[in-house]
Amino acid sequence: MHFFSRGRRVLATAAAAAVLISASLFSAGAASAAPPPPARMAALGDSITQAAMSCSSLISCPTNSWSTGSTASVNSHSARLRAAGAASLVVYNNAVSGAASSALPGQAQKAVAQGAQYVTIEIGANDACTKTAGAMTPAATFRANVQSALTTLAASPASPEIFVASIPSLQRMYDLNKSSVSARLVWGLLKICQSMLEKPTSTSAADVQRRAAVQQRVNEYNQALAAACASVAKCRYDGGAVANYAFSKADISTRDYFHPSLSGQATLAAVTWARTQWAS
């Protein structure tokens, strides 16, 4: 009798645990349910989101944008949303080549006026890509600019879903093409990201430390993006997916050896989409 009584108690305990686990899984599934497809979306940021250097000339090519582009091979966020049911999705690309974080609050205001229900943000490269390392935007200022923009978006009547992408590794961009004569020539002629790319062949302690300081500032910006996004409802950070992605040479434009190429934009779209509200 004692054995069977004990067995009943074990079975009862197991059954109760199963009910609790089932309820927990159900609740987690409900909490992670994808939001409804948006009717309007807006992209905020800089030349990366304008897809600069991804076409045949030294101009922006927003049709190739990882966020709002229409080029089939890129399979942008907007294209994926249309395929998922947002057939009539209206898109706005408010990104501006050369924009730093100080421009983000204004871009956010435009997105609010446009009634955007989904907003992507990719910002920060130009805060670090300055003439000198000393001219980089302070991390606290960067955080305040981003926070201001997110607060504006969160207060929008459209109550948008927000996706914040991390900043690519500038050190990685340098390392990929530092041995290329063509890249070094273009970097010098166009004065691209001199805080990182000046004296690209130098191995002096000062130049190595300068590059490390620039990448450290980028790391601080990414930490600021994560923290600012975490403080706002309906904001999703990419978890460092872009920052940690090991871009290949094929991902980088041969127009300036620094911006994403057409295939690089497709890579950005895939890497970031996997972290959005609709994919995870």
Image (cartoon, rainbow, N blue to C red):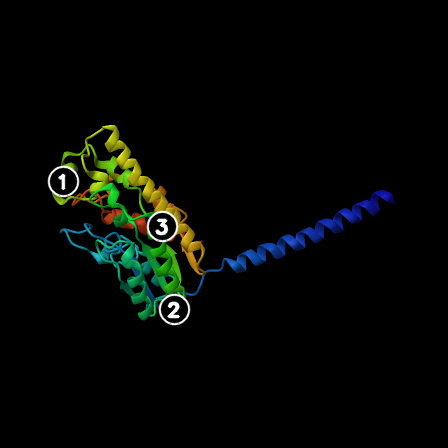
Label 1 sits on what residue type?
A: Gly
Say whether disc 2 or disc 3 marks the residue closer to the N-terminus.
3
Residue 165 is at least partly visible in this image = no
| Residue 179 in which image quadrant | top left
Q: Position of residue 12 (x, y in %)?
A: 75, 51
Label 3, label 1: how far apart the Cα atoms are = 30 Å
Q: Is residue 59 left or right of residue 240?
A: left
Label 2, label 1: how far apart the Cα atoms are = 43 Å
- Mark 2 sits on what residue? 156
Secondary structure under the numbered disc 2 in the rendered image: loop
Q: Position of residue 65 (x, y in %)?
A: 26, 55
Q: Is residue 100 left or right of residue 279?
A: left
Say whether disc 2 or disc 1 marks the residue closer to the N-terminus.
2
- Which quadrant of the figure contains the N terminus? top right
Marking on residue 27: none
Q: Residue at the location (38% across, 68% down)?
A: 156
Q: Is residue 33 left or right of residue 37?
A: right
Other residues around mark 1 within 10 Å, as few (<14) / some (14–19) / many (≥20)? some
Secondary structure under the numbered disc 3 in the rendered image: helix
- Mark 3 sits on what residue? 140
| Residue 102 in which image quadrant | bottom left
Marking on residue 188: 1
Label 2, label 3: how far apart the Cα atoms are = 25 Å
Frontmost residue, 108 versus 158: 108
Above or below: residue 224 compared with residue 208: below
Q: Nearer the viewer, mark 2 or mark 3?
A: 3
Frontmost residue, 206 versus 169: 206
Label 2 sits on what residue type?
A: Ser
Q: Residue at the location (37% across, 63% down)?
A: 118
